[in-house]
């Protein structure tokens, strides 16, 4: 499929130019069912990890990029971390900022700068400390410990029991400021419900309650129409790709099924590194066109990542063997899979996780299938 190949070439060229345009940095890439950095080991440079169970007990003198089901950092990371997983536990020390996405997040350690977190629930214990801001998109948040900066974001239910050096500005379904809370700045919250501020809680600044403005019904219907149109657009594009390049589309879906952890790891790296590399390249005059083109193709790749994932989901439900399926059966599986993704994205606090996983696996499939062209099944023509 030419659009995939062109996107891949431009993304890789951008990464190469960025590497040559900046000082060479050491990095370590690891993968497997269980990946461990044992206590006493020192990783010089950045660490890229993908695995079912990832545990870092040692020291990393760089940034950590990790994806998996269970991620645990008990040791010391002198750089920042970018993590995506189901259950993520931060017990150790992180020198710079942390960017985390998952289902359940537990924070017991220290984070040197800002902490950006998107998850179903997060628990920050009394031992935890954040030297910067806490920026969150959460279903449930329990916030103890100390936050030197501000708290901002959107949360379904939040309980603040620790110390906040700055302001708290939240959009929340329900908010509890417990008796042990110490907020050095002000409290501003947008909610249909009055916050529960327990006796003994300290708020140095002003407290402001904003009631959310309800959107008119026509805005809801307008949004619904656009969502349906978006589903139909990706379905039509997917059908076109199946008709003109069924083998390539099948190869992308096959790569996710046969090499899931490799695909996940590569996709996470491409998702994070590509825009950074493009921006670095754009700093130079000669690299500006390449950076802009790469960002455009990067956006196209993000959008088209739904196609192989939708096809795989449909296949798994229909239970049709790839080597026996016709284009008509591929289209039926694609339509079913894309519809399931469409429905899942409508679920609050679940939709963004589904979208993130779709993008990561889709980008990873682009790289994995290109490295294993013989994995293609079915024919073109």
Image: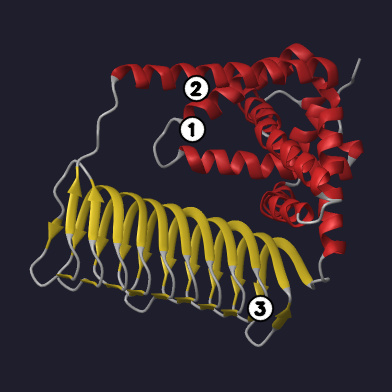
Which image quarter holds the N terminus?
A: top right
Q: Which residue is at 82% across, 52% downward? A: 285
Do labels 3 and 1 touch, CB within 8 Å?
no
Q: Which residue is at 71% across, 64% downward? A: 48
Q: Which residue is at 70% across, 69% downward? A: 47
Q: CA distance from mark 1 to mark 2?
A: 10 Å
**Direction from residue 72 to residue 21 in the image, left or right:** right
Q: What residue would you read off at disc 3?
A: 60
**Direction from residue 381 to residue 56 in the image, left or right:** left
Question: Residue 136: x and y, percent?
Answer: 41, 55
Q: Nearer the viewer, mark 1 or mark 2?
A: 2
Question: Residue 27: x and y, percent?
Answer: 77, 70
**Direction from residue 257 to residue 117 in the image, left or right:** left
Do labels 1 and 2 touch, CB within 8 Å?
no
Quadrant housing residue 290? top right
Which circle's residue, 1 or 2, is located before the other in the chain?
Answer: 2
Question: Residue 71: x and y, percent?
Answer: 56, 64
Q: Residues within 10 Å of mark 2 (few under 14, many from 20)?
A: some
Q: CA distance from mark 2 to mark 3?
A: 43 Å
Secondary structure found at label 2: helix
Quadrant housing residue 193? top left
Q: CA distance from mark 3 to mark 1?
A: 36 Å
Secondary structure found at label 3: strand
Q: Which residue is at 32% across, 58% downward? A: 141
Q: What residue would you read off at disc 1?
A: 345
- Tell which of 97 and 4 is nearer to you: 97
Q: Is residue 179 above or below residue 264?
A: below
Residue lying at the far left of the rendered structure: 199
Q: What residue would you read off at disc 2?
A: 227
């Amino acid at each position: 499929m030419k659009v995939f190949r062109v996107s891949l070439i431009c993304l890789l060229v951008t990464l190469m130019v960025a590497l040559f345009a900046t000082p060479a940095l050491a990095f370590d890439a690891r993968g497997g069912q269980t990946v461990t950095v044992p206590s006493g080991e020192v990783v010089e440079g950045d660490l890229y990890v993908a695995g079912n169970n990832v545990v870092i007990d040692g020291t990393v003198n760089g940034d950590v990029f990790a994806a998996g089901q269970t991620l645990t950092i008990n040791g010391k990371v002198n750089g920042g971390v970018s993590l995506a997983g189901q259950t993520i536990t931060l017990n150790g020390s992180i020198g710079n900022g942390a960017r985390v996405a998952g289902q359940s997040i537990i924070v017991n350690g220290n984070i040197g700068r800002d902490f950006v977190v998107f998850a179903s629930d997060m628990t920050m214990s009394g031992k935890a400390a954040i030297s910067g801001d806490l920026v969150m998109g959460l279903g449930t948040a329990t916030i103890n410990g100390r936050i030197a900066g501000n708290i901002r974001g959107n949360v379904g239910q939040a309980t603040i029991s620790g110390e906040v050096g700055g302001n708290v500005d939240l959009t929340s379904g329900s908010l509890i400021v417990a008796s042990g809370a110490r907020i050095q700045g002000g409290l501003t919250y947008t909610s249909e419900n009055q916050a529960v501020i327990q006796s003994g809680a300290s708020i140095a600044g002003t407290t402001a309650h904003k009631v959310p403005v309800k959107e008119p019904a026509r805005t809801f219907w307008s949004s619904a129409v656009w969502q349906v149109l978006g589903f139909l657009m990706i379905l039509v594009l997917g059908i076109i790709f199946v008709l003109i390049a069924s083998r390539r589309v099948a190869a992308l879906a096959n790569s996710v099924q046969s090499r899931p952890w490799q695909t996940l790891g590569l996709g996470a790296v491409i998702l994070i590194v590509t825009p950074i590399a493009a921006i670095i390249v754009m700093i130079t005059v000669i690299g500006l066109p390449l950076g802009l083109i790469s960002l455009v193709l990067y956006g196209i790749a993000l959008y088209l990542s739904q196609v192989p994932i939708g096809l795989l989901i449909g296949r798994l439900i229909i239970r049709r063997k790839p080597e026996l399926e016709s284009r008509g059966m591929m289209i039926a599986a694609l339509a079913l899979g894309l519809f399931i993704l469409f429905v899942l994205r409508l679920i609050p606090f679940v939709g963004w996780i589904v979208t993130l996983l779709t993008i990561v696996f889709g980008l990873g499939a682009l790289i994995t299938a290109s490295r294993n062209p013989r994995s293609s099944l079915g024919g073109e023509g």
